[in-house]
Image (cartoon, grey):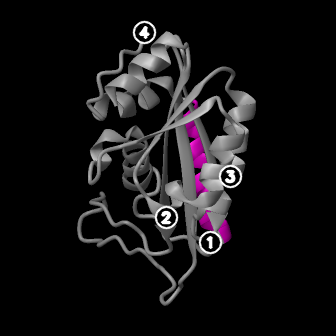
Amino acid sequence: MDPGKKNAARLKGWIVFLDETGLLMAPLVRRTWAPQGQTPVLAQRTRRREKVSLVAALSVSPRRRRVGLYFHLHPNANIDAIRLVPLLHALTRHLRGPIFLIWDRSNTHRARVIQEFVRRHPRVRCVLLPPYAPELNPAEFLWAYLKRNPLANLAPRDAGHLTRLAARHTLKIAGRQALLRSFIRASGLPLRLS
């Protein structure tokens, strides 16, 4: 990734980390507090196969002063190459200059639709992370934070409820520069943020 980072700095380009995740109806149970003698109970509907898929892009500005967050939610759907294209279009509309898109080696990211999109948008360049190295993608830390903090112990009523809560909490995260920067730092990538 080192050549990509140097090119991004030289060309004053955006560095964008992209990743997908899914949220299920079953709550991620974490330790919690309760009055003594009262065991906390999470009421949940069983056998619900509903879910919400999320795709997000963390963008680092050319001058490294700001980290942005772009995301799309897809209730009851899997993220495929077709569902990635609208987010990629949004990135090309909002980010001026070269875009260095850094993501894992998922088949979705190497699909023909994505290759066609990159061919039609020459200012978008793709950089693949090494295999089996999710810890290098700051978006993975975003997902970990979202699932283990604001959405922990949540038993949603349905996919619509889960979608609204995920959108609200992701928007809150998007407004917290210090938190977004911490995801970049946690990846251990040698990327200086001013």
Quadrant of residue 59 within the rendered picture: top right
Q: Are marks 2 and 3 in contact (CB under 8 Å)?
A: no
Residue at image position (48%, 80%) is: 44
Q: Position of residue 102 (x, y in %)?
A: 46, 38
Label disc, if present, on residue 194 of the rendered structure: 4
The disc placed on residue 96 is none
* Mark 4: amino acid: Ser
Which amino acid, mark 1? Ala
Q: Amino acid at mark 2?
A: Gly
Q: Secondary structure at mark 2?
A: strand
Q: Is residue 120 magenta?
A: no
Viewer-nearest of labels 4 and 3?
A: 3
Q: Secondary structure at mark 1?
A: loop
Q: Which-is-in-front pick, marks 2 and 3?
A: 3
Q: CA distance from mark 2 to mark 1?
A: 9 Å
Farthest residue toward the right?
A: 93
Q: Are marks 4 and 3 in contact (CB under 8 Å)?
A: no
